[in-house]
Amino acid sequence: MSCEALETIVKSCDNNSGGIEKIWINQQDNIASFTLDATNTWTIDAITLAGGAPDYTPFEIRRNTGSYVEDAAIDLVNGSSYVTATISLMFHRRDQDKSQAIKILGAGQQYLNAIVKDMNGKYWYFPYLQLSAVGEGSGQNRADGSKYSVTLVAENDYLAYEIEAAAVNAVIA
């Protein structure tokens, strides 16, 4: 017996670009709820912040320095499955302000969530992220530049939900 009816995947004629254009991050505890579009249950049409919670914080990255990957782990024997989402970001030119912001991201191994705008202009919602790695340094050669690499990881039941632009604009600073 089938659990759900199969849905078609249509070949797109649109241009397809990789990478992250923008990212906004908030603490998971600041999210009261989100609602799914009534006609497309894989699209978020509203995010409600908890009373008094701040808007999402922007984290600015340069072109070609951010990406996300979603890998499904499906165990056919145990009947379990989940998706590991990994967001990788690069912040150029090390300084105290960036060090402090990264330290706060990982404080107490807190849960975070992110809204990612990809290079195709689509917005994606990644809940229950945690800072899992910070690296890099000064570089060896002058042309290397100094930088931080930051990795956020989550294990969720589903792939990231797409978010409507109006819902994003309502919660970003």
Image: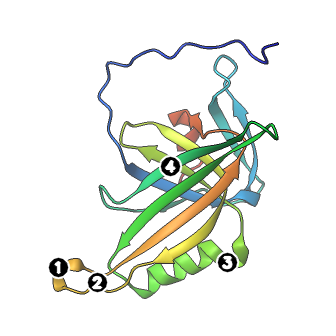
Task: Determine the residue positioned at 64% across, 20% down.
Answer: 40
- Point out residue 139 in the picture as x, y percentages from the top left corner: 28, 84
Asked whether, in this view, residue 128 is left or right of residue 146, the answer is right
Three-letter code for the amino acid on which mark 1 is drawn = Ala
C-alpha distance separating marks 1 and 4: 28 Å
Residue 107 tag number? 3
Name the residue tied to disc 1: 143
Task: Determine the residue positioned at 67% across, 78% down.
Answer: 107
Are dots 1 and 4 in contact, CB under 8 Å? no
Rate crowding at label 4 as few (under 14), some (14 to 19) or many (20 or more) other CA atoms within 10 Å.
few
C-alpha distance separating marks 3 and 2: 26 Å
The disc, 1 or 3, on the residue closer to the chain's N-terminal end is: 3
The disc, 4 or 2, on the residue closer to the chain's N-terminal end is: 4
Residue 69 tag number? 4
The disc, 3 or 4, on the residue closer to the chain's N-terminal end is: 4
The disc, 3 or 2, on the residue closer to the chain's N-terminal end is: 3
Rate crowding at label 2 as few (under 14), some (14 to 19) or many (20 or more) other CA atoms within 10 Å.
few
Quadrant in the rendering for residue 112: bottom right
Name the residue tied to disc 2: 139
Three-letter code for the amino acid on which mark 2 is drawn = Gly
